Image (tube, grey):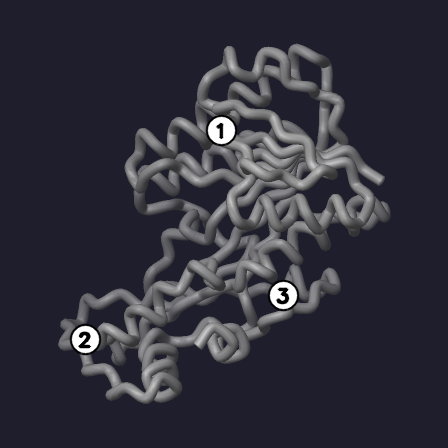
Amino acid sequence: MAKLLIVGCGSIGLQLAEELSAKGHRVTGLKRTPPKSPSADIHYIAADIAQLEQLKYMPTDFDVVYFIVSPDGRNPDSYRAVYEQGLNNLLRVFEQASANPQWIFVSSTSVYGQTHGEWVDEESIAEPQNLTSGYIRQAEQRLTDLSAKNIVVRFSGIYGPGREYLIRMAMQGGAVQQDPPYYTNRIHQADCVGVLGYLLEQSLAGVALQQYYLASDNDPAPMWGVISWMAERLGLEPPLIKALDKTAESNKRCNNQRLTALGYKFKYPDYKSGYAELI
C-alpha cells in the first residue's frame, strides 16, 4: 500500500481520498479548510499552498502526490496563485527534504487551443488561447520536466451531482448553435475519481505509463444534440437555432484512446448514460 498526499480535497479529491483509504492506502489531504467531520482514516493538513510558511512543517515522506486544485476565481491571479506559486512552494518543500514522490497532476483540456472541430489527443499541440489555461500548461511542463514518472491527466468538462450546468441550460431555453456543430467534451466526476485511482493502481503494479492522459468520455457530441436530447427528456420545447456567421467556432473533439487502451472502462461512457441518471 502507498502513502498518498492529495492536494486540494474538493468534491473529487475527497471522494478519491475516501476510496483510496478504503483500499488500504494511507491518505493525507492538504486543504485550506479541512472537513469539519473528517473520516477517521484520512489525516488532514490545514494549509494554503500559496503561502510557503504554512507548509513549513508538512511531512514529505509520500510515495505519490495528487495535485487536484481549484482556483478561487476565473482570473489570472487566482490561477497563478495555485498553479505557479502554490506548485512551486510544494516542490520547494519536497526538494529541501530531498524527497521525490511521484506526482499525478489534474489538468484540463482547456490547454488545447484548437477551435475548428479538430480531434485532439495527447500528441496534439497544446497552446492555450488564454492566460489562465497558460498557467495550467506551465504547471504541466514543470512536473513532466521534473521527472519521467510524473503523470498529467487532462479532464474535459466535469459533470455530475452539483455540476449540472447543461441541465440548467436546457431548462432555461434559448438559442443553441447547430451549424457548424459546436462539440462538447465531458467526463462524469465518478470517472474522474475512477481514472485517478486506476492510474495509481497501474503505476504501483509496475505498468509503464505515459506522462499524459486525456480523460474524456467516448462521445464528443455537438451541443445541439445534447441540449435537444435533454429538453426532450425534461418534457421541454426543443432549443432555438442560434444565428451565426461563417466565423463561428466548432471547439474540439477529445480522443481518449490512450486511456481506454490502458484498460480503463468508463462508468459513464457518454452523456446519455450520465445525464439520464441526473435527470
Q: Earlier in the sequence, mark 2 or mark 3?
A: 2
| Badge number at residue 32 | 1
Mark 2 Cα shell of 10 Å, populated few (<14), some (14-19), many (≥20): few
- Quickly name the residue at label 2: 174
With respect to residue 140, does 154 lie above or below?
Answer: below
Q: Is residue 235 left or right of residue 18?
A: left
The residue type indicated by label 2 comes to Gly
| Mark 3 residue crowding within 10 angstroms, few (<14) / some (14–19) / many (20+) | some
Mark 3 vs mark 1: which is more N-terminal?
1
Residue drawn at x 63%, y 30% as measured from the top left: 44
Q: Residue at x 56, y 49 (%)?
A: 12
Q: Could you say whether the residue bearing mark 3 is in a helix, strand or loop?
A: helix
Please give left or right for residue 220 compared with residue 18 in the image. left
Within 10 Å of disc 1 (Cα), the crowding (few <14, some 14-19, many 20+) is some
**Mark 1: secondary structure:** loop
Tell me where residue 53 appears, x and y as whole percent. 51, 11
Please determine whether, in this image, residue 154 is positioned above or below residue 78: below
- The residue that label 3 is drawn on is 257
Frontmost of labels 2 and 1 is 1
Q: Which residue appears farthest toward the front when viewing the image?
A: 37
